Amino acid sequence: MSGILTKLKDKLQSYRVPGYRTKFEYKWTMVVDLDRCNGCEACVVACYAENNLPVVGKRDCDISRRFSWIRIERYIEGEYPDVKVKFIPIMCQHCDAAPCELGCPVYATYHNQDGLNVQVYNRCVGTFTCATYCTYDVRRFNWFTYKWDSPLEQQLNPDVTVREMGVMEKCTFCIQRIRVAKDTAKDEGRKVTDGDVQTACMQSCPTDAITFGDLNDPNSKVSKLAKSPRRYRLLEELNTDPSVIYLKRVMDEKKGHGSSHG
Amino acid sequence: MKRRYFLKFIGAGGIGTGLGMLFGQAIKPPGAKLIPYLIPPEDVIPGLANYYASLCTQCPAGCGVLVKIMDGRAKKVEGNPLHPVSGGKLCVRGQAGLQALYNPDRVQGPMRRKGARGSTSFEPISWEEAIGEVTTRLNDLSAKGESDKLYFLTPELGGHLGKLADDFMAGYGSSNTIKYDLFDYRNLRYANRASMGIKAIPHYDIENTKYLLSFGADFASTWLSPVGMSRGYGEMRQGGHTGRGKFVQVEPRLSLTAANADEWVPAKPGTEAVLALAIAKEIVDSGHYKGSDLKTWKKLLSPFGLSYASEVTDVDKKRIRHIAKEFMSTRPSLAVGGEGISGYSNGVSGLVAVNILNHVAGNLGIKGGVQANSNDLFGGNDADTVGAGIQTLINAAKESKVGLLFHYNNNPAFTTPGSAKAADALKNVPFIVSFSSFLDETTALSDIILPSHTSFEDWGDDFTNPAPGFQVATIMQPVVSSVYKTRSLGDIFIGIGKAVGGTAKAKMPNDTFATHLKASWKRLYAKDKGMSASSFTFETFWRETLARGGWWNEKSAKKRKLSVSTRSVARHVSKEPAKFEGESSKYPLYLLPYAQAGHLDGRGANIPWLQELPDPITSVVWDSWVEINPKTAKRLGVKMGDMAEIESPFGKVLSPVYVYEGIRPDTVAIPIGQVHKLYGRYAEKRGANPLEILPSTVDTRTEVYALNSTRVRIAKVSRPGDLVKMDVYTDELGRGIVQTVPTGGQFKKSSHH
Amino acid sequence: MENISYNEVNEDVVRTMTHTTWKYWVALVTCAVMATVLWGGAWAYQIYVGQGVTGLNTPTFWGIYLANFVFWIGISHSGTLLSAILFITATPWRRSIYRSAEAITFFSVLTAALFIFVHMGRPWNFYWTMPYPTTRQLWVNFTSPIMFDVFAISTYMTSSVIFLYFGSIPDLAAVRDRVTGWRKPIYTYLALGWRGTEAEWHWLSKSYTFFAVFIIPLAVSVHSIVSWDFALSMVPGLNKTIFAPYFVVGAIFSGTAAIVTLMVILRKSLKFEKYITMMHFDKLCLLLLVMSLLWSYINVVEVFSDWYANTSVENETLRYRMFMPPHSYMYWLMIITNSIMPLLFIFKKLRTSIFVCVVVSIGINVGMWIERYLIVATTLPRKYLPNMWHGYTPSLIEISITVGSFFFFAMLFLIFVKVWPSVSIYEVKEDIGIPMRKGFKRH
Ligand SMILES: Nc1nc2c(c(=O)[nH]1)N[C@H]1C(S)=C(S)[C@@H](COP(=O)(O)OP(=O)(O)OC[C@H]3O[C@@H](n4cnc5c(=O)[nH]c(N)nc54)[C@H](O)[C@@H]3O)O[C@H]1N2
Ligand code: SF4
Ligand code: SF4
Ligand code: SF4
Ligand code: SF4
Ligand code: SF4
């Protein structure tokens, strides 16, 4: 009897976890050190270049349709002269319990064997459910079929699909680069090792604020950084189990260093 | 080339010439750019990327890059991981260089002016015609014996291209090469030469410092070498050194860099030098300084007492003393001075003051402080000589002393203060030849355009400046065939030189710039600057240098003592704060025009990625704005997004308002780079250009325009604003989004990297 | 209704189908044209250009289309409830109105279902949401509330059509027996050979009762499921336990109000004063009063618990909805129409005033539409990361499609009254009081 109950409990539990994997071959993880990040946005442009993100123009920016898969959020607090500006780069958190995956009726977004929240453009029917459910507002929708003024289209990365009108997209952890690394490793008969994959944002980041790697590998940089006492995850209380780990910024928040400072 | 184009191409051959012509139309890009599949170039594998090492020219920092090429197209610029400056990293502008290469608004081939000057009506001509025309003009001028009426206006031209241009000018008989860039660090070079006797810009070792005191250096976005410095910054913070370095930023507005500082000191505009010297005085008085010339320093610094400094700078006495104490007791510490101290009427003095501060604190010539850079591979450092400046050219043009002007890749009609009337002066020049690749405000004034390649299409080299403490030469190589009918600037000079004949011809020993570059490097190699250390032949050396992206030698780092003597700096030290035009009663607000991360001096404005990149602080896209403190805004009755008129004694501009807590109530700031009249579809007619309302005040020692040199007043205008900013809300509401830990516990290392 | 003869009933109802005035044609053509232009045209444009023609944005990916979807699903509850619930509770006054109510159900579910297509980025791939065996072995995601929707709505739509049709068979036979010309074969076919034998009545009664019992939980589940499109997310203001009952109550509330409005129109235009009497309005308005009180109760509970919880996310959503224009104006208007105006129905005199009934019922429908609109338009702009907050204003295209949907619905209803007996002939006859055949006594 209790065996059946446990089974039933597990079964019910499994319906609460979107996707169907609990163990990952690789567990791709990103660590963002907010004490290093200076908000320069090099990562943002790098992602545009790598992932064929369209430029939407002023009007569409105005109604919040900018495409960047990674954005720098700014929070300004305090009054002059005790002002603090805080930055945080936010991209898809590749939640292991991703609300977006739960919402997609057609499995256009699902969890793969490497712990990635992947997006299958061809499969997407554009119901917006994933984007509505995403608690981090990282999903971007192709409101139109975007055009590149010729010859700007010559820059488009052939390793990445150019998306068409009506489909959802978001940061992929540069899956095309992961693929290349996995193929190369396979050809060489080994596993992907630390440093084989660089996401475009990580690659450009001048302050080295972003680190990417496999959390299943105990010796990887991300595994080590993930143990930092400064570790936290964004909106962790929502139990989305994100794959992006932030390291807290070091700063004295409350009493600022205004002119009265001794 | 795509597979189906290939098939089409094969098909065309089979069906015959007539049909083939039709197919030819269908085959875009044209056949010349097809990669033949049967006998492909050895380094092209369709579908696989190749990476070529090259040089970023989006700013003068000279980062080494890798360009990813697939099927003959440039796909991505990445930092060259081997390069000592970029270390595999890049800034926003470096990333976006590709959109300059593939910009739809480039000048697509040589053109001759058809309409009135500045009317942008040009007709395409052939390269032969273009070179012929320029040659005729040059010959006419030299026939009149007025060779020295040829002026060449250019930004700092690095490496051998600069040399070649100099050779051409010398061969033709003119010494009038005018170097101009709105942000070209002439003040810094001058100040360093005057105070420390060094020509090359030194290495500011942010990475290893424990206490960084920055006077208006926005190194996170624009100053000097943003990528190199940001790399240093990241390491300083969490690089696994023994402790986390502290960082204090002095400037009237909280820039991106200041937003990262542990403390922000909003000193009154123009008083930063006084503050630096007051800190220096504290240090000298405290007995920290042990030099034999202690007395003379005490005397020199005596006017900068705490009371005076505090009153002038609007910084609390206690705070000045506290900074001084931390600055001298934290070892090593480092003071740097950026546009926020050099951009005043006494800019050189401000930078000298920073050097004095470093000297008395003992930061010169040490790890984590200021390190001298050796001269570049030429042996000297021509690039660092501060020669005649833009004002010289403007005056000469006004006085009709310019007979023929060569103009390349800078845009004084946009980047000089409105009252300098650069455009008007240039209209006075009988014939202007432009080598620019974009039809900007200055190029539009030219009579003939000989468009040159972008850095992706051309050869070149650069002796990185500032170098990271040792010699670095970065090679630029063509990574794609030219997108339009442009030419290498070196080739243009060689072509013109050969056509002109005489000494100019004699100075052009090679047929192309590519061979010239290689030959020049062969000479450097022969001189053996440690290049042939192993048993290389030149050919292997050259191949490896191209593959690596350049040549650098960490061993060439020489520890050199640096010092500042009272004698050398005395005449640059002044008790007076910088001067501002406009009576404070009529014009109550200081105006700070500043370089914006994406657009720098405006050159990035034609790049869609950068237009749509939210400003790191204000998050504004596709526009510029005027930053106003909330208290001031309330007093003026303006709200976020309202349109305001900013008026100086020299003119007015309209700009939407951005209400910002991070700016002094007596100061407003406007980013530079927008409101191009001409510069392509992405740049034109948006935002406000604060340069339009600046006086033409220069620091006479360097002819550098003082950007921060006028006061303004602001009035609300009833026109609706159209400010688009990506952050509508900047309040975290206690949701723990950007979590922090206090600095107290964090001076210990907390993570490995 | 005592003084009406059976024949008169037959004649009256069939007359509405066979005798058409020019006013009808004007109304029908207007509706058809407006629906085509406002909905069809705008939608075609949207499909061609992209969803960018809407005012949707990041993070407000759901807007007026989903509000309309929920609204029309809500309206659909009229038929089911009035017909089925009143049927099994043997409430006599349902008889003259239930047929139209059931039609409303079907048409509004249809309109609602179309809004799913309108809302989709790639509607032409709609069939991908159907679990059918494909060579690619792609299956649908049964954990998605959107999938729940697909099943719930298709089941509901099928059931409501069958329910409507079953209940109409005797009347279709009556029509068959009275019409001539081209209509004859159609109704002959539709009447399925109904002859009115005892056995036929027996089985009709059985199956109708079965459907009535079946469709009530279905209707409740459909609207619960619709609420879960929102409530199963983690979006502040949407993730609410109370949403399912709230939506069901709201659905009955708006559905009943829609019926009242339509009854008034039918009564006037088809001269059905004999069949739709003040008694009907009295009862319906009482129902409205009860639903209004329930609705208000849930609203108060929701706001109170949010306020009491005092978390940043709840507070901001409430503030945005209740105190920030323009949504605050809509919010308080909704409170007036849905909580305050129905209180008038406490008084019998007002319940039996056609004027008051119309004003209040239209008010309720406006209020209920606002409720649905505010649910999406005031929650998504206030999600977890304030930096991404962005409001939503529907574009002209969206407004056009919304208005068009009302014309579309009206068009369907106009066609219905011409092709279908819009009042149940046989059940009205029961009302007249002469006992029916054995085996169908109860009603
Ligand atoms: N008995 C038997 N029959 C088989 C099979 C088997 O295993 N056994 N295998 C089957 C399979 S899997 C396949 S794929 C087929 C293959 O069958 P086919 O497609 O007929 O393959 P081939 O005979 O290898 O080559 C076809 C022709 O292409 C020409 N050719 C070569 N290069 C080029 C070129 O660049 N351009 C053009 N236009 N022509 C070129 C060759 O000269 C040759 O004449 O056979 C099938 N039939
Ligand atoms: S961040 Fe959003 S899109 Fe990414 S996995 Fe999580 S819920 Fe999905
Ligand atoms: S928009 Fe696409 S990915 Fe998102 S839920 Fe709908 S179908 Fe799935
Ligand atoms: S991981 Fe790749 S896709 Fe994601 S934000 Fe970084 S660059 Fe963009
Ligand atoms: S590139 Fe690095 S430092 Fe710059 S904003 Fe991105 S994460 Fe921060
Ligand atoms: S700092 Fe200058 S040289 Fe370096 S990447 Fe940026 S623009 Fe290029």
Image: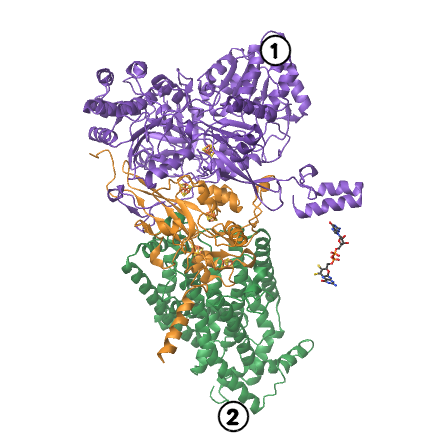
Chain colours: A orange, B purple, C green
The reply, left or right, for residue C99 in relation to residue B731 is right
Question: Circle 2: is it few (<14), some (14-19), or many (20+) Cα within 10 Å?
Answer: few
What is the three-letter code of the residue carrying label 2?
A: Lys
Nearer-the-camera pick, A217 or C106? A217
Query: In the picture, which quadrant includes the C terminus of chain B?
Result: top left
Percent x, y of residue B533: 49, 28
Percent x, y of residue A94: 43, 55
Image mark for residue B141: 1
Q: Could you tell me which secondary element the residue under label 2 belongs to?
A: loop
Which residue ends up furthest to the bottom in the rendered image? C438
Percent x, y of residue A181: 51, 50
Rendered view: B502 above or below B62: above
| Residue named by callout 2 | C438
- Residue at point 47%, 21% (across, down): B383
* Residue at mark 2 to residue at mark 1: CA–CA distance: 121 Å
Q: Locate residue B127: give its quadrant.
A: top right
- Nearer mark to the viewer, of 2 and 1: 1
Nearer-the-camera pick, B493 or B581? B493
